[in-house]
Image (cartoon, rainbow, N blue to C red):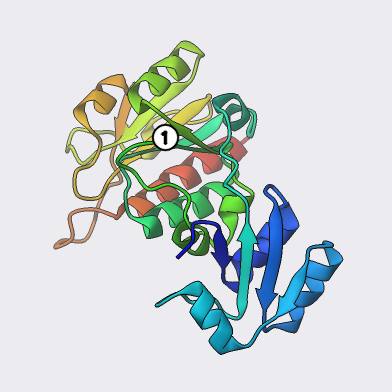
Amino acid sequence: MSSRLIFGTHPVLEALAARRRDIAVVLTSESIIEQQARRAQVPCERRSRPELDQIAGPGARHQGAIALVGEYPYATIDEVLAGAVPALVLALDSVTDPQNLGALVRSAHVLGAGGVIVPRDRAAQVTPAVVRASAGATEHTRIASVVNLTRTLEELKERGLWIVGAVLAEGARAPWEVDLREPVVLVVGAESTGLRRLVQRVCDFAVRVPMTARGVGSLNAAAAGAVLLYEAVRQRRQP
């Protein structure tokens, strides 16, 4: 599957709405997609479902909508910081699952984070599967891809942001015991390994979502990130 394809009703509609990257053509069997493409003055071609199946590739759930787009426009760190005041940033350490990345980007967008930071190597980047998993939120969210996550976090500390890492350690604080109203970076690691040791050393605070049920050790990365983002937003909305 081409990395320049976006497929699915919501992802294509959001790409048309955001227009953050070039859209060469929309291929669709659905009238609503065709109408939105025409309204956005984007070339649109009607195709049958079997034709779209062949273009999207095996296993792709295109829902009758595919867009051929340009490269994903990754943001700069300054653009991510400007997305929310005070700054609220989600950083992901070695999250390789496209479904988790998509879900985390969707939570960041819906809950008003300024953006998301991902490492360039050994981590998921924005692919058609990620766009699909985010329901198109990638097209609205500032996502920065950095060479060295640890160094980036250190630079953000120097710029006055607090670094809060999600860990599994029993001694970590609950998220509501940490002041998240200040400029903050919330750091979530991969499900299997958590935060790398070098990343943990940069963190000012370690937090852990308390578990009440037995048998399952922790939330997955997507759920943990959503909980932390929601807690930050909850604190900021209080008088």
Q: Residue at x 73, y 76 (%)?
A: 45
63 with respect to 173 (left or right): right
Say above or below: 63 vs 103.
below
Q: State how many labels appear.
A: 1
Residue 218 in picture, x, y percent from top left: 23, 53
Residue 13 in sight in this render: yes
Query: Which residue bears the numbered disc 1?
Result: 186
Say above or below: 190 vs 13.
above
Residue 86 in sight in this render: no
Amino acid carrying mark 1 in the image: Leu
Residue 107 in picture, x, y percent from top left: 51, 52
Q: Residue at x 29, y 30 (%)?
A: 206
Residue lying furthest top in this view? 158
In front of the other: 63 or 185: 63
In front of the other: 199 or 233: 199
* Other-residue count near label 1 (Cα within 10 Å), few / some / many at <14 / 14–19 / ≥20: many
Residue 141 in picture, x, y percent from top left: 59, 45
Say above or below: 45 vs 166.
below
The N terminus: image quadrant: bottom left
Q: Residue at x 51, y 82 (%)?
A: 53
The C terminus: image quadrant: top right
Q: Residue at x 42, y 35 (%)?
A: 186
Query: Which of the 4 image quarters holds residue 94?
Result: top left
Residue 230 in picture, x, y percent from top left: 49, 47
In front of the other: 154 or 7: 7
Q: Secondary structure at mark 1?
A: strand
Say above or below: 130 vs 227.
below
195 with respect to 187 (left or right): left
Residue lying furthest left in this view? 215
111 with respect to 167 (left or right): right
200 with respect to 182 (left or right): left
